[in-house]
Amino acid sequence: MLTGETHEIFFSTLYDLEERDQNDQRKDYAESKAFQGICVTNLAELNEELANLQQRDPKLQAKLDELKPTYDQKDRQRVAELSPLISYQ
């Protein structure tokens, strides 16, 4: 049978373990909140970057559409210039 002093040591150990567990949980919660804050910030930055890229896409497409006729014309000229050389071989 356990003596009174043994009961006291047993319950003291249980209380210490419970306190350590609660402290660990508070620490984990604080770390989790800090990490969550970093994630939210990073996500906001990525969303902003995505929005900027989506705005740039139509501008780039418009520039490509503007340059395509010039490219096609120069391509046809190159083909025409190379045609005699190719047919000669």
Image (spheres, rainbow, N blue to C red):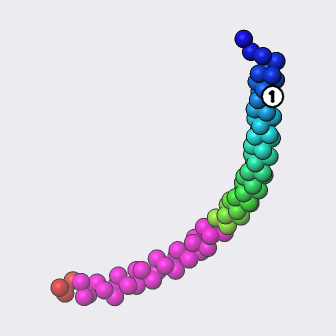
If the image is split into quadrants, where does the C terminus sit?
A: bottom left
Quarter where residue 25 is shown: top right
In the rendered structure, which amino acid carries the disc numbered 1? Ser
If the image is split into quadrants, where does the N terminus sit?
A: top right
Q: Can residue 35 be seen at all in this image of the molecule? A: yes
Quarter where residue 19 is shown: top right
Give coordinates of residue 64: x percent, y percent: 57, 72
Q: Is residue 72 above or below residue 20?
A: below
Residue furthest toward the left? Answer: 89
28 inside magenta stretch: no
Mark 1 neighbour class, 10 Å CA radius: few under 14, some 14 to 19, many 20 or more:
few
Q: Is residue 87 above or below residue 25?
A: below
**Mostly what secondary structure, the magenta segment?**
helix
Residue 65 or residue 8, whichever sits in front: 8
Q: Can residue 11 be seen at all in this image of the molecule? A: no
Give coordinates of residue 82: x percent, y percent: 31, 86
64 inside magenta stretch: yes
Looking at the image, residue 14 sits to the left or right of residue 81; the answer is: right
Give coordinates of residue 33: x percent, y percent: 79, 47
Give coordinates of residue 76: x percent, y percent: 40, 80
In the picture of the structure, the residue carrying the numbered disc 1 is 12
Q: Is residue 67 above or below residue 82?
A: above
Count of labels in the image: 1
Residue drawn where x is 38% and y is 85% of the image: 78
The secondary element bearing badge 1 is classed as helix
Residue 78 or residue 5, whichever sits in front: 5
Residue 52 or residue 69, whichever sits in front: 52
What is the magenta range? 59-86
Q: Is residue 18 above or below residue 28?
A: above
